[in-house]
Image: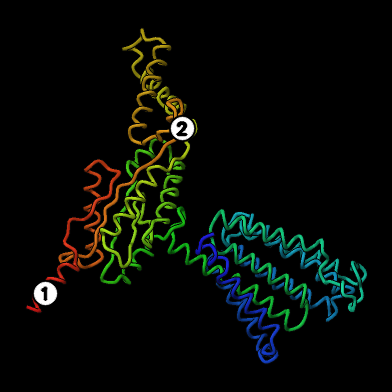
Amino acid sequence: MNGRTWKAWLVPGGVLLALAAALVNSALFFQVAPSLSFYYVAVFAAGLLLAWRFNSSRVLFSLLILLLAHRAVDFFSNGQVHTGPGRTAVALAALLIPLNFIVFATIRERGLIVAGIAPRFGLLFLESVVFAVLCRPENSFEYGSANPLHPGAFPIPLWILLSFVAAIAVFVRRFFQTRKPIEPGFAWSVAAVFLWLQFAPVGKASDAYVVTAALILAASLIETSYVLAYHDELTGIRGRRAFNESLLSLDQQYAIAIVDIDHFKKFNDTYGHDVGDQVLCMVAKRLSDVGGDGQAFRCGGEEFAIVFRNASAQEAFEHLDALRQVIEKSTFQVRGADRRAEKTAEKSAEKSAEKSSNRRAGTSQSDRRKSAKRKAAASSSKQRDLFPQPASQSPDHLSDHLSVTVSIGVAEPSTRNRQPEQVIQSADQALYRAKNNGRNRVELASTAPLRVAQGKRAKASRL
């Protein structure tokens, strides 16, 4: 895992839970305990408002589950969690909270409309009824040791602990699928719930753990909104807004590269938007690994930008050319390309044959099929010309494995172009020159570096 992945997992959920656990087990906790009630109400109110404002039914109902489960355990236990209804309430809360988090994660997010919240409200109501019935004194069940002094008398039975493991596994898997900070937030929230029910089911410590679980969910929701605002949702790299803000913090020496995928529109038209999205993700992944401490951004469509801080255009050129070669050698598989091209050509031939049937009445069906195959072969040949094939592939698989190329223009501040916007225009002009010179190349902007002009002025002043 890279640094961004570690950061997404540790901040804010891991940090908040570590601070809460350290506070609960310190002498300072007894001093702040009287203010926990206000803190508790404030965090849950703020979390519910944020979930409503961001139109997230998943977070809103997860907070409601936490709040209701905590109140239920406190009500039915009456200070005693090792026997009777209190022990049953702890076990049910330990089972239902992780399972509900899993269910809310798998249900499609539809916002706070009636069709989206009605099933969740129904599930919440049904579970509340079952919880209340099972926690009645005559229905409460016993498990494990009932002696609170027994060292093996855990509030949570071991088999119910599997629900926590399953929930964390689900959120880890979802994070690597979506790369959204909300998934680590739910994982850390489940961990906070475990600490609450296992070590402090009642009392002020339970308030601290529950409110920490709620705070983690609220903070993760804000972090996810930030990521969606400043990162491109498809590729996962920084987006246009982050690029514009990065320009404001540039020093005097920097280089900006503009990257464009060659023939991307024709690629989209030939293979479809799904394959085009795969190309964008592949190129973005390669751009994010560029050397020279370059930061990659997706500016829109098939256009990307890379910012090199404290580097000249010539220094960035070496890293960009190595990046261009890496992208050129990267391949991906497109299954059934020949069949799709042949099928499309056959349909086109059949339509044209129907329209001109009176003029070509003597043409047979087999002739039309041969014409369609010739058009398919010509289409495949044109595709191979536009999208290079890896040399290691045999001719029989030419249409299955494809690669793309990129054209890059790079510029730096100069005597005439001092502002970042002007540097971007110079990089754009260099990009157009790379396109006109045959594509799949890196071009430097033909401007005099600013540092050379500054050196000349300094020399003239000394004279």
- Ranked by sequence position, the earlier of labels 2 and 1 is 2
250 vs 49, nearest the viewer: 250
What residue sits 25% from the left and 64% below the top?
421
Is there any visible trace of residue 200 in the rendered image? yes
Question: For the residue marked with disc 2, what is the amino acid?
Answer: Asp
Residue pictured at 68% horizontal, 67% vertical: 190
Name the residue furthest left: 463
Q: Please report contact status of discs 2 and 1: CB closer than 8 Å, yes or no.
A: no
Q: Secondary structure at mark 1?
A: helix
Secondary structure of the residue carrying tag 2 is: loop
Q: Amino acid at mark 1?
A: Lys
> The C terminus is located in which quarter?
bottom left
Q: What residue sits right under mark 1 in the picture?
A: 459
Q: What's the residue at 77%, 76% (across, down)? A: 199
- Tell me the crowding category of disc 2: few under 14, some 14 to 19, or many 20 or more residues within 10 angstroms, Cα based: some
Give the residue pinned by disc 2: 400
Q: Position of residue 184 (x, y in %)?
A: 60, 64
**On-image quarter of the N terminus:** bottom right
Q: Quadrant of residue 97?
A: bottom right
Determine if residue 120 is in view. Answer: no
Residue shown at the point (64%, 75%) measured from the top left: 17
Looking at this view, is 9 or 94 the one in front?
9
Q: 43 above or below 158?
A: below
Q: Position of residue 84 (x, y in %)?
A: 89, 73
Q: Nearer the viewer, residue 434 or 178?
A: 434
Label tally: 2
Displayed quadrant of residue 100 = bottom right
